[in-house]
Image: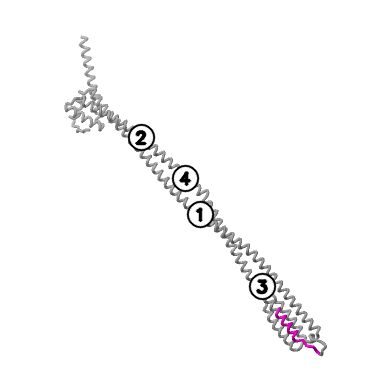
Amino acid sequence: MKNVNKFVLLSFLVMINYALEDVDMKQQIEQLDQNRFGHTLLDTIYLQLQTQEPIERLMGTLQQIEDRYYQDQKEEDVSHKDYQDSCTVDLQNLDQNIKVSDNERIKLEARLEGELYPKRQILQKLITQKQGELKEFTGELNELDQQREEEGEEYQHKIHEHEDVIAILMQARTLFTENLQTHDNSFIQLNNNGIELLQKHFGASIKRASKFTYRTSWGKMFKALATITSRVHQLQDSAQVENVILLIDQLLEQVHDSMDLEKFSEEKRIQAYEKTRNLLVISINTTESTLASATTDLALVSEIIEQTQATLDNVNQRLQMLQLSRDDRFTICEQEAQDYQDSRSQRDSDRDVVSQTIGLLNKSLRTLKEQLALRMSAGEEFEYF
């Protein structure tokens, strides 16, 4: 009786185990069926089982698929590593090129800001300063030349006045000497004709002296001489006549001395003018030379600045292109890494599906057939792979 009970209990346990296995396999099939690849694979296995082909052939095919997944993953791992290594090299090269270009940019900007721009500013200030000095020196030179011209004209007028005075006095002396006569063989006197001529001469000289510009005092001298000649009785004495002639000679000597003094002063003015003018000319020449040199240097510096700015523009463009290339390369490499990760995950998922299917086949082929038959009887559409 005890043996019978044991048999019943054991049979019941076996039935429960089979039932549990059926439930477990059904859940596994449902889980595989939710996966698109698993769905297609189950359809293919069911058809294979319907052809009555040996199960070993199906198992071999599934194992080949599993092995192929494994081998493909190994190959993709190697390919991915090679590609990512090339990405690393490319990014390092791009980073190095960016660094070199950025250093070049820094040097160019430093040269512009620290050397060329300040030098250009200094030259511009120097040119402005020298242009102002040149204008000032030129103005002083023009003013000096104009002053010299005016002084020369004034000197010529003074000389002409002196010459006129000398001519008047010489004419007066001549009139005295040509119109003297001896009276009763006792003394020298001026004849009536001489007196008349002298009075006319001095009268005209007084009018002429009134038009003088620089020495109007000459007219007073002529008036004095005219007064003397008008006193005829005083000129009937030889001593008085000789005194008048002596006075005229003294006046002539004074006028000559005055004219010599004017000539001496003119020479001194000319010497001072020439000295000052030479200094101004030297200053002008020196300033013009400095200005020309600064202008040439400014043109050269401006050209260098223009070239440096053009080079800097090219470097900045190259930097921008390198940075864009790096960003693009980085994005592509990251996208490839993401694609690799997605592909690996998908391949692992598909390989797990194949492995689970192989496990189902190895575990209970009979139960699998029944579950697949139930699945197909439910109206599932076939998909093949």
> Could you tell which of marks 4 and 1 lies nearer the N-terminus?
4
Q: CA distance from mark 4 to mark 1?
A: 22 Å
> Residue 182's image quarter?
bottom right
Residue 280 on the magenta segment: no
Q: CA distance from mark 4 to mark 3?
A: 73 Å
Vertical order, 52 against 197 (above or below):
above
Residue 47 screen position, x and y as percent: 18, 29
Vertical order, 212 against 309 (above or below):
below
User: Mark 1: which amino acid?
Assistant: Leu
Q: Return the residue nearer the eye: 85 or 45.
A: 85
> Could you tell which of marks 2 and 1 lies nearer the N-terminus?
2
Q: Disc 3 on helix, strand or loop?
A: helix
Q: Quadrant of the N terminus?
A: top left
Residue 214 screen position, x and y as percent: 68, 75
For the residues bearing labels 2 and 4, Cβ distance under 8 angstroms = no
Within 10 Å of the Cα at label 2, are there few (<14), some (14-19), or many (20+) other Cα atoms?
A: few
Q: Disc 2 on helix, strand or loop?
A: helix
For the residues bearing labels 4 and 1, Cβ distance under 8 angstroms = no
Vertical order, 182 against 287 (above or below):
below
Residue position marked by numbered label 1 in the rendering: 300
Q: Residue at x 79, y 85 (%)?
A: 235
Within 10 Å of the Cα at label 3, are there few (<14), some (14-19), or many (20+) other Cα atoms?
A: some
Q: Which mark is residue 104?
A: 4
Q: Disc 1 on helix, strand or loop?
A: helix
Q: CA distance from mark 3 to mark 2?
A: 105 Å
> Could you tell which of marks 2 and 4 lies nearer the N-terminus?
2
Q: CA distance from mark 2 to mark 1?
A: 53 Å
For the residues bearing labels 1 and 3, Cβ distance under 8 angstroms = no
What is the magenta range? 166-183
